[in-house]
Image (cartoon, rainbow, N blue to C red):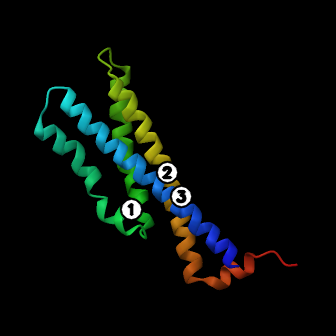
Amino acid sequence: MSSNLETLEQKSNLWYRATLVFYMGLIITIIITNVTQQFSLLKLVVQLVPLLIFVPGLIHKIHHRTYSWMCFVLLVYFMAYVVEIGSPLMQWTDILGVITTVGLFISAMMAARFIQRWQYYLNNPHELAEQAPQK
């Protein structure tokens, strides 16, 4: 029984760390894009504020809804980067933006899934015992 719970905890920790890596990668990509192109503080703030809203949820890790909502917000970033890639003015930061956005979307989605399951079984240990294979 505790083996399954430990496995869920390990998976949630793995996807949590992957989410943090891609999250920082996307923030750095946005900053690099704004610094290498014509710098505008307003543009930088507009691009970063929606991502920075999720920092408290990412610090605490225990709220699976943080990751789900982040996935919804990431769709806007994904659409913007895909449009930029289709543009004749495409830059290498646009490709990096798509890669980090897709990576963050997948890792946040998986983190939400495993954190939710892990917390459910922590609060309902009898459910985990019922799923254990009988010998």
Q: Which residue is mark 3?
A: 14
**75 left or right of 39 in image:** right
Determine whether 72 is above or below 67 in the image: above
Q: Which residue is mark 2?
A: 107
| Residue count near mark 2 (Cα–Cα under 10 Å), binned few <14, some 14–19, many ≥20 | many
The residues tagged by marks 3 and 2 sit, at their Cα atoms, a distance apart of: 9 Å
User: Measuring 26% from the left and 54% from the top, which residue is drawn there?
Assistant: 52
Q: Which residue is mark 1?
A: 66
**124 left or right of 41 in image:** right
User: Measuring 41% from the left and 41% from the top, which residue is drawn there?
Assistant: 101
| Residue extending farthest left | 41
| Labelled pair 3, 1 in contact (Cβ < 8 Å) | no
As shown in the figure, which amino acid type bears the numbered disc 3?
Leu
| Residue count near mark 1 (Cα–Cα under 10 Å), binned few <14, some 14–19, many ≥20 | many
User: Measuring 41% from the left and 69% from the top, which residue is drawn there?
Assistant: 63
Whether residue 108 is visible to the viewer of this picture, yes or no, is: no
Which numbered disc covers residue 46? none
Describe the element under mark 2 as helix, strand or loop: helix
The quarter of the picture where the N terminus appears is bottom right
Quadrant for residue 74, please give it: top left
Q: Nearer the viewer, mark 1 or mark 2?
A: 2
The quarter of the picture where the C terminus appears is bottom right
Describe the element under mark 1 as helix, strand or loop: helix
